[in-house]
Each structure stands twice: as structure tokens, then as C-alpha cells.
Amino acid sequence: MSYQSLLAAAGLGADQLQHGVLIARTPIDGTELGRLEADTPERIEAKIAAAVAAFRRWRLVPAPARGELVRSFAERVRRNKDALGALISLESGKILSEGLGEVQEVIDICDFAVGLSRQLYGLTIASERPHHHMLERWHPLGPVAIISAFNFPMAVWAWNAALALVCGDSILWKPSDKTSLCALALHRLLDAAIAADPQAPTGLSALVLGGPSAGEQLAAHRAIPLVSATGSTAMGRAVSLATAARFGRALLELGGNNAAIVTPAADLALSARAIVFAAAGTAGQRCTSLRRLLVHRTVYEALLAPLRRAYASLPIGNPLSAETLVGPLVDGAAVERMQGALAVARQAGARISGGESVRLPGLEGGHYVRPALVELLAPIDISRQETFAPILYVFPYEQFEQAIASQNDVSHGLSSALFTTNLLEAETFLSAEGSDCGIANINAGPSGAEIGGAFGGEKETGGGRESGSDAWKAYMRRQTQTINYSPHLQLAQGVKFDIV
């Protein structure tokens, strides 16, 4: 199927993609897919004003009815799953099964949000005053700006959008300019659901296209109480400063330098499979990708031998081909950063397997690399930094406590993993003295989160939580309410204030 056919299947006609300064290219071979107009500051301002007006109406719609809008949107996504999954592969470069999996994640979070629309529970609180009762109640927050990254061009937006909508908020979406087509295709399905819902106001959801300045305008705007941003730590720091300056909220999902520990008690066959996917899947371009591997000396060679074989034989190629397991990096700059990191490791004496650029017939304009295993005796500065590419730094260790300390000795705190069949090791890793990350897994790699659990991390990962569990509270405002059902004024803490 041609690229234009894939675009058309996702609802993107050639007439929509002919004008503008935003050039969409596929990392498969560098082909230009289309051009889109960037929103001007004036147009962004108008979309924000419309979102404010829409919020004032949407907050009055009962939450279960808001859930029905999300259900309707999810049904449209289900019907278009194959086309949307192929579009993700075409524009971001991830393999087709991962593209389809990402669309399934959109569907799953919508299902979660529909159920949530009947479970936005508050609390009743015992009052110390007689004839009083107290409540904790949650109210819609306001317009929510969502800034998403290229590597999950649909799912991360959906994590935020589905929850925000059932919570009674309007939304504005600023996608990565590397994956504007994915945003356009998915958002048109939400537009259709909104148009078909008599209770959904115009302006409830808006797509904002453009570069960093568009995100900066959203982050600084006083009418937007919450900015949810996914991307680099540098980007998150800028968003955090902009929102803090106006006392807004920032929900940040930033970088990760995730580690896995393999102990002598590990199932090595299971460990090897999990490690290869976590480190090489999505061409190492997940925030949860495995970047550091700590292996006990007694099982080091037994594990590294199959890892080296797997890395040497991973099928690299067109992500739309079923046999491909590793697609391209998103652009040439990503390749340069990878090669720069490998050069530093090489100078430090690392043993490197793979890492070279790969030229594929007919795909010369793409950015393909072989995933790299970088074996070192101890961590170095470059291994403590996140390089958004398929580089796995491998270190031996002697003591379990040493491995945990090494895992935690980075500025990020997103995801982590331990491979062991030893109950004491597993429980220690999951305890307060174990992993310092927001996500900790036993006998499963650090990548591949499910929507039921809140997603996010600590330290320079940002501290935010999205998706499942009680992450919905970020999209609402909490109000403590006190009701006196007597004719007497009772003051708390025994305070007396009698007047004549």
C-alpha cells in the first residue's frame, strides 16, 4: 500500500496536506508526506478563548454523560484501529505491532475513563463539632493543555484527554511537530464524536499545531490551570517555570534512564527476552526504554552470550513489514546523538557490539541503526545521561545493595526492573530502600506500562502521574466543605468568640 493510501485510510486527504510550513516526513525513507499550517499566536489565543467558553458549559454536564462522549470517541477509534496503527508506524517509525498496540492503548484508556465517569468519589470526614459534617468534593478544573512527544503520538494524549474530558475539562492538544499527522487523524475522530453529541459544546477540544513557541504560549497562559507535558527534561523544566510563575499546575512526564538488575537467582532465558525488547523495542525511543543493565558477575557471561547473539540478528527495516523488529530512529539528529554517545564510551574502553548505521536498499533516506550493547566495568558520565536511542550499557556487580545503589545513581527516576526468583531480593527491591523509581517491576522489563496503573516517575522525570489509578485527581480541583445543621455557631479547636 502506498503512503498516500495509508494517509487516506486514516482520513487524511491530499487536499489537507498541501500547504504550510510544517513538513511531515516519514522516517522510513525520508519521503515528504505533506505540509500543514502552523497556528499563529492569534489563532492559538482564539482556541484558548473557545476552550474557556466550552469548559463553562461542559462542567455542568453530568459526569456519566461526559463519559458517553468518550465512549463514542473510543468506538470510532476501534473502527479505525488498523489505519491509525499504520499511520503511527509511517510517521513515527515504530513497528506495526507497536503502532497497533498504541491505538489499543487509546481504546483501553477510554474504557477506563468511561467507568471512571461514575466513580469520581470524594470523602466524608468526621467533624469535631457537634451537628456538623464535612465533605471533600472534586470539581472540574478548567481548560487543560496537553503537550505530547513524537514517540507515543496518540496514546499519551489519550491518557490525558480521556480523563480530562470525563472530569469536566476542555482540552487543547499541542502534538510534536514530528507527528502532526497522527494528531490530525486522531483528533478528527474526537471532533466527529463532539459534533454528534448534543451536550458537547463547540471548542471542547482543539488541536494546536506548531513548534516550541506554540507550547510556550500554552504553558504561560493564565486561562489554562493545568499543562500536561511529555518530553525531555529540558522542555519540562521550561514548562514548570512558566506555569509556576503564574501559580498554574504542571503535570510532567519527562526522561528516563532506566535500569534492570539480573541476580544469580534470575531465570536467564526470561530475562534475556525481556531485556532485548525493553532495550531495542521502539528503537530505544521510549522514555521507559532499558538503558542500563546490572548483571551479577556469576551469571554475566551466561546472560551476555545470548544477548550478543540476539542483538546481532535483530531484523532491522521498514516498520510496516511484519518481520521487522527494529525500525528507524526518528531523524538524523537522533543518529548523531547515538554515535556521539558511543564514541565517548569507546574512548572509555567499552566493548561495543552493534551501534553502526545500517543502509537498506530502497530506504536510503531513513535513519537505521543496529542496537548497541556497551559493556563497561563501571558506570561513566555518558551512561548516567539519557540518550534517546537503542544503547544498552551493561555493568557487572558483586553485591545486591551495590546494584540498587548504582541503579538509583542517576538524575531520572522513571522505571526499573529486577530479574530474580529470590523472594527476599524481590521484596527488598520493592521496599523503601529499593528502587527509587515511580515504576518497579519484577521479572518484567521497565517498558510496557498498562493503563490501570498510574504512570510516571520521580526526580528529573517530573513527578507527575497519568493514566490509571487515581491520576484523575490531577485534572480536578478539591474542595473541603463544612455544613452546620444546627442553629448554633460552633468554633473548631474549642475557640471562644462571644459577642454581645
Image (cartoon, rainbow, N blue to C red):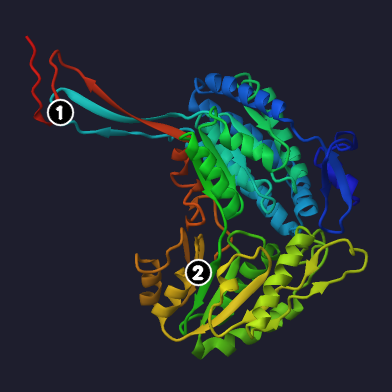
Identity of the residue drawn at 77% across and 54% down: 89
**Tag 2 and tag 1, C-beta contact below 8 Å:** no
Give the quadrant of residue 160.
top right
Give the labeled residue for mark 2.
417
Query: Does residue 111 appear anywhere in the picture?
Result: no
Whole-number angstrom distance, CA of label 2 to CA of label 1: 48 Å
Against 174, residue 452 (above or below) is below
Q: For the residues carrying marks 2 and 1, which lies nearer the camera in this image?
A: 1
Q: Please, what secondary structure does the residue beneath circle 1 have? A: helix
Residue 3 percent across, percent down from the top left? 88, 49
Q: Quadrant of the C terminus?
A: top left
Q: Amino acid at mark 2?
A: Ala
Give the labeled residue for mark 1.
492
Q: In the image, which disc is placed on residue 81?
A: none
Identity of the residue drawn at 63% across and 59% down: 286
**Mark 2 surroundings within 10 Å by alpha-carbon count, few (fewer than 14), some (14 through 19), many (20 or more):** many
Identity of the residue drawn at 53% across and 20% down: 56
**Mark 1 surroundings within 10 Å by alpha-carbon count, few (fewer than 14), some (14 through 19), many (20 or more):** few
231 sits to left or right of 30: left
Against 307, residue 34 (above or below) is above
Residue 48 percent across, percent down from the top left? 62, 26
Q: Amino acid at mark 1?
A: Ala
Identity of the residue drawn at 81% across and 58% down: 320
